[in-house]
Image (cartoon, rainbow, N blue to C red):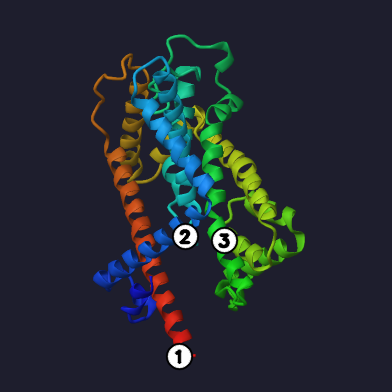
Amino acid sequence: MEKLLSKVVPMDTESLVLWRKPLTTLEYFFRELVILSSTGLKRLLAYKLLALAALLLISGTTVSYYISGPHQLFVQEIVLTVAWWGWWVILGVCSSVGLGTGLHTFLLYLGPHIARVTLAAYECGGLNFPTPPYPNDIICPSEIDPKNVVSIWNIMAKVRIESMMWGMGTALGELPPYFMARAARLSGGSVVELTEKDDSRTGRAKVMVQKLVQKVGFAGILACASIPNPLFDLAGLTCGHFLVPFWTFFGATLLGKAVIKMHIQKMFVIIAFNETLVAQALAWVERIPYIGPKLEAPLLEFLRNQKARLHKKDSATPENQGSILSSLLEKFVLAMVLYFVVSIVNALAQNYSKRVGKKKGKKKE
């Protein structure tokens, strides 16, 4: 690690981005990645029993997954379920990690998933979708289970696990700012975001969040976490800076994001994609002068394709070609993912440059 730092000259971090200095940025990114990986590995090895237990669990699961026997189907089902839950946790982490550069996975993944289930429920008249192919694909059931009739509460229950896993991921993604500020405070330093003065609306909102968290404690953190709040990173920084106990911060964040806020967002999407409201929205789109009819046509085509897919009897049946709208959505998602990756590369490269600058400053002293 010392060799990595000694070979680099610190530079202006703001100019260290892929579109200005691609080679230097990539070099710094990989150097920072090596440092973080080695640090994480050392910390993991410090907990030898935990690391050994995790290794044995992964090895045992892998072996039992591939060895034939009566247990195989059971193990495969567990692995698929855990992978499905883990997918949403990872998406949640991606959505909140990075101090504002996070990938908005609710809009790109969870929201569309809830909307798809909602539209399918109203089209099929029930929620007992055949498994498989659900949750990867949705097909209308041949018979409707009376316990799974269409209602807002049943739809909420259908997507509850995915939503809560995503919310748990967003709570986990708030931990880096907390630990960063806590480490800075314990080492005698401070966090720039908490000390710089800003008289704008955003600056005043930051001050309000800081005061709320500092004075109210658990209830304040819970309140900030329970509503869509782009400034919640400041709550994590504030809690870390004022050495709020970990479980107070994480408990309130987890409860707020994975339970309260998640149910609010879920309810909003389900109500918004009610079949009646969707039809009304399409009617409003049609009334837009000049572009209304042009927008309505691809939207109707998209909905027709989705409804046709719900009624296919075999999941192996070839699907219709995607509409222009679905193609645009795919490109939009790809662009967002690419932006997220670029942001992470830039952030790690800039972090490495700051690391080098601090080391050079200490040597001069």
Say whether disc 3 or disc 1 marks the residue closer to the N-terminus.
3
The picture quadrant where one finds residue 267 is top right
What is the number of the mark on residue 305?
Answer: none
Count the numbered circles shown.
3
1 or 2: mark nearer the eye: 1
> What SS does tag 3 mark?
helix
Q: Which residue is mark 1?
A: 364
Label 3 is placed on what type of residue?
Answer: Asp
Across and down, in percent, residue 208 comes to 68, 66
Secondary structure state at the residue bearing disc 1: helix
Q: Residue flagged by tag 1: what amino acid is it?
A: Lys
Taking depth in this image into account, of 321 and 355 the one nearest to the observer is: 355
Q: CA distance from mark 3 to mark 1?
A: 33 Å
Q: Which mark is residue 233?
A: 3
Residue drawn at x 24%, y 22% as measured from the top left: 318
- Identify the amino acid type marked 2: Gly
The residue shown at (38%, 32%) is: 62
Instruction: Name the one closer to the observer, 248 or 20.
Output: 248
Which of pointers 3 and 1 indicates the residue nearer the eye? 1
